[in-house]
C-alpha cells in the first residue's frame, strides 16, 4: 500500500483529521506509526463501539501499531465508583478483543494498555502538575464539556481529565490519537498544551457519533438507545423493531447509521452484498453492494423500515455470535450488577 492508499483507508468514514497534511506526511516518513484510542471503563460496551473497532482495524491494515487505552483512572475521574474499576476493566479487556474477532481483524499489532499502569508514576504526575500551571480552569472545563458528566456541582476531577488525556499521547509514545467527534475539544486542547511542556502535538482523527435506536445519541446509560453486546437474538430483534426509523428519512436514523458505518464497511471489504429477503408480494429479495444504494431506495420509500430492520437484526446477531458465553455474563454482572 502506498502512503496515499493508506491515507484513503484511514480517512474513510472519518469526520475530521487535524491535519490531513500532517497525516500524509507521517505516512510518508514513518514505516510503522503508532496510534491510540482511549475509552474510559464506565458504561457497558455496546454495538456503537464497532465504529471505532472498525476504524482501528483500518489503522492496522495501514501498518500502524495500534494501542487501546482502557482508561480506568479516567473512569474514576468521570464518576465511576472506585470499587468497581478493576471489575469493569476486566470486562472491557475481555470483550474488546472479541469485537476485533467478530469483524475478522488481524490484531498482531494491537495492544491493550491499562491507564493506571503508567498514569500513577512519578514522571507522569510531575508532567500533570506542570501542565496544570499552563492550562486555565476555563480551558480545561471547556475541553471536557462534551465528555465529562459535570452536573450542577462539578467535581475537580473533571478538570484533570483533559490534562491526562493530552499527556497520554506522549506517554503512550504515539503519533496519532483517534476518538469520536465528541472528543474534539480535548484533542485540540492536547495539540495546544503539549508543546507548552516540551512535547510535540499529534495528529488527531475523529469519526462521527452514531444516533441511537431512539434517534438521539447512542448512550450506554440509555438501554433503549443501544444494543448491548450480550443481548440475545430476540432482544436484538425486538429493539430494532422498536427503533426510530421514519420512512424515507435519513437524519437521526440509527438503523441507517449503523448500516453505513459498520455493516456495509464489512460487506464491501469482504466483497459481499447486503440482502433483504422479502416475500414476492412485497417486492421480493433486494441486494445492495453499497450503502449509497440502500439510502437511495430508502429515501424513495421503496424499502420499508421494517424490512430494513429485520435484515439488519440478522447482521447484528451474526456479529454478536462471539459473545454467547456464560462467562461474559458473570464478568459483566461483577462490574455492572446487571
Image (cartoon, grey):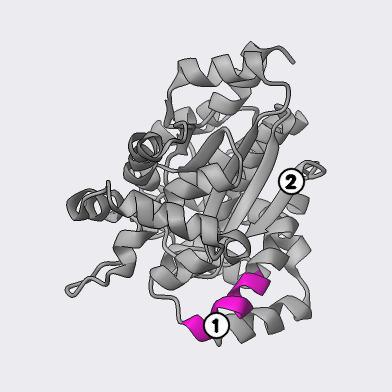
Give the percent coordinates (x, y) of residue 138. 18, 52
Q: Is residue 249 visible?
A: no
Question: What span is in magenta?
Answer: 82-91
| Picture disc at residue 103 | none
Q: Is disc 2 surrounded by few (<14), some (14 to 19) or many (20+) residues within 10 Å?
A: many
Q: Is residue 207 left or right of residue 2?
A: left
Which residue lies at the image location 26% right of the left edge and 67% below the top edge?
A: 150
Specify the quadrant that holds the N terminus: top right
The answer, for residue 154, to whether it is visible in the render is yes
199, above or below 147, in the image: above
Closer to us: 113 or 279: 113
Prevailing secondary structure class for the magenta stretch in the rendered image: helix
Identify the residue shown where x is 76% and y is 32%. Answer: 270
Q: Secondary structure at mark 2?
A: strand
For residue 89, which quarter of the picture?
Answer: bottom right
Q: Residues within 10 Å of mark 1 (few under 14, many from 20)?
A: some
Write down the quadrant of residue 313 in the picture. Answer: bottom right
Could you tell me residue 301's position as x and y percent?
Answer: 41, 36
Residue 276, horizontal then vertical, whole percent: 64, 43
Who's the residue at 46% across and 35% down the image?
199
- Where, by quadrant of the figure, is residue 27 drawn? top right
Q: Which mark is residue 110?
A: 2
The mark that comes first in sequence, 1 or 2, is: 1
Out of 136 and 329, give the one closest to the viewer.
136
Magenta stretch: includes residue 83: yes
The residue tagged with tag 1: helix, strand or loop? helix
Residue 219 horizontal side relative to residue 228, left or right? left
Residue that numbered label 1 is attached to: 84
Amino acid at each position: 500500500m502506498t502512503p496515499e492508499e493508506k491515507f484513503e483507508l484511514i480517512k474513510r468514514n472519518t469526520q475530521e483529521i487535524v491535519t490531513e497534511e500532517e497525516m500524509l506526511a507521517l505516512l510518508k516518513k514513518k514505516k510503522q506509526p503508532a496510534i491510540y484510542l482511549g475509552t474510559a471503563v464506565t458504561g457497558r460496551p455496546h454495538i456503537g463501539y464497532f465504529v471505532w473497532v472498525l476504524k482501528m482495524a483500518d489503522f492496522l491494515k495501514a501498518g500502524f501499531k495500534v494501542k487501546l487505552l482502557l482508561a480506568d483512572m479516567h473512569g474514576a475521574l468521570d464518576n465511576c465508583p472506585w470499587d468497581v474499576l478493576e471489575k469493569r476493566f476486566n470486562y472491557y479487556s475481555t470483550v474488546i478483543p472479541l469485537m476485533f474477532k467478530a469483524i475478522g481483524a488481524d490484531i498482531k499489532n494491537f495492544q491493550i494498555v491499562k491507564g493506571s499502569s503508567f498514569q500513577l508514576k512519578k514522571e507522569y504526575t510531575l508532567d500533570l502538575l506542570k501542565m496544570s500551571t499552563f492550562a486555565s480552569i476555563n480551558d480545561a472545563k471547556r475541553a471536557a464539556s462534551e465528555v465529562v458528566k459535570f452536573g450542577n456541582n462539578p467535581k475537580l476531577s473533571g478538570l484533570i481529565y483533559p490534562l491526562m488525556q493530552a499527556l497520554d499521547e506522549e506517554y503512550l509514545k504515539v503519533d496519532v490519537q483517534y476518538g469520536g467527534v465528541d472528543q474534539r475539544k480535548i484533542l485540540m486542547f492536547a495539540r495546544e498544551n503539549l508543546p507548552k511542556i516540551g512535547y510535540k502535538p499529534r495528529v488527531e482523527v475523529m469519526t462521527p457519533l452514531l444516533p441511537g435506536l431512539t434517534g438521539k445519541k447512542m448512550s450506554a446509560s440509555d438501554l433503549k438507545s443501544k444494543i448491548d453486546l450480550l443481548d440475545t437474538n430476540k432482544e436484538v430483534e425486538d429493539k430494532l423493531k422498536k427503533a426510530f426509523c421514519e420512512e424515507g428519512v435519513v437524519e437521526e436514523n440509527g438503523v441507517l447509521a449503523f448500516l453505513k458505518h459498520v455493516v456495509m464497511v464489512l460487506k464491501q471489504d469482504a466483497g459481499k452484498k447486503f440482502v433483504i429477503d422479502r416475500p414476492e408480494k412485497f417486492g421480493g429479495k433486494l441486494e445492495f453492494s453499497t450503502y449509497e444504494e440502500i439510502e437511495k431506495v430508502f429515501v424513495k420509500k421503496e424499502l420499508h423500515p421494517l424490512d430494513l430492520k429485520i435484515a439488519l437484526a440478522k447482521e447484528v446477531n451474526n456479529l454478536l455470535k462471539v459473545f454467547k458465553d456464560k462467562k461474559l455474563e458473570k464478568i459483566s454482572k461483577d462490574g455492572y450488577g446487571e
